Image (cartoon, rainbow, N blue to C red):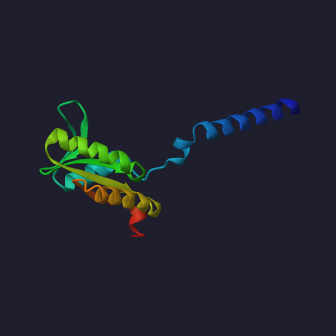
Amino acid sequence: MVRILLKYKTVKLGLILIMIFIFPAPLLARRDHPEKWYQQKWCEAQKGQVEVVLPDGTRCDCVTDTHAIEFDFGNNWAEAIGQSAYYSLQTDKKAGIVLILESIKDRKYWIRLNTTIEHFNLPIDIWSVCSAAYSKYK
């Protein structure tokens, strides 16, 4: 009986360790809010339209009178550049990026985005939104 119990506990511990090492991203990637939450709040405040379907079937996160805007979390700053440029091309509006910063550590992504846009003189306007947790440190 003791052997079976020890074997069960060993197998259970082994499965838990496998889950942690194989699927760490879902266990570690905790967001304050989903991207869509930030899109809706910011876009509605700018009197824009959320999730606009473009002629080729892609979806622009937010379209205002002047901008086609991509929303992304800080660590996706580089991808946001390409997406916003493409949305601009499809809509004939200015490209824009809203970078979502959820912690003080995300500030490095804002700096990377800003530096890249300035260095290459890219015609992209940028804004940031912060979670409540980050806002108290700004």
Quarter of the view holding residue 85:
top left
* Location of the C terminus (image quadrant): bottom left
Measuring from the top left, give residue 53's x and y in whole percent: 20, 35
Image point (30%, 44%), residue name: 82
Nearer to me, 14 or 75: 75
- Is residue 53 visible in the rendered image? The answer is yes
Task: Find residue 109 and report its horizontal and vertical position in percent.
Answer: 40, 57
Q: Is residue 64 above or below residue 91?
A: below
Point out residue 6 in the picture as x, y percentages from the top left corner.
83, 35
Residue at 43 percent across and 51 percent down: it is 75
Residue occupying image coordinates x 13% and y 51%: 66
Horizontal arrangement in the rendering, residue 14 relative to residue 80 (left or right) = right
Is residue 37 shown above or below 127? above
Query: Percent x, y for residue 99?
Result: 33, 54
> Which part of the image, by quadrant, shows the N terminus?
top right
Report if residue 131 is visible in the image. Answer: no
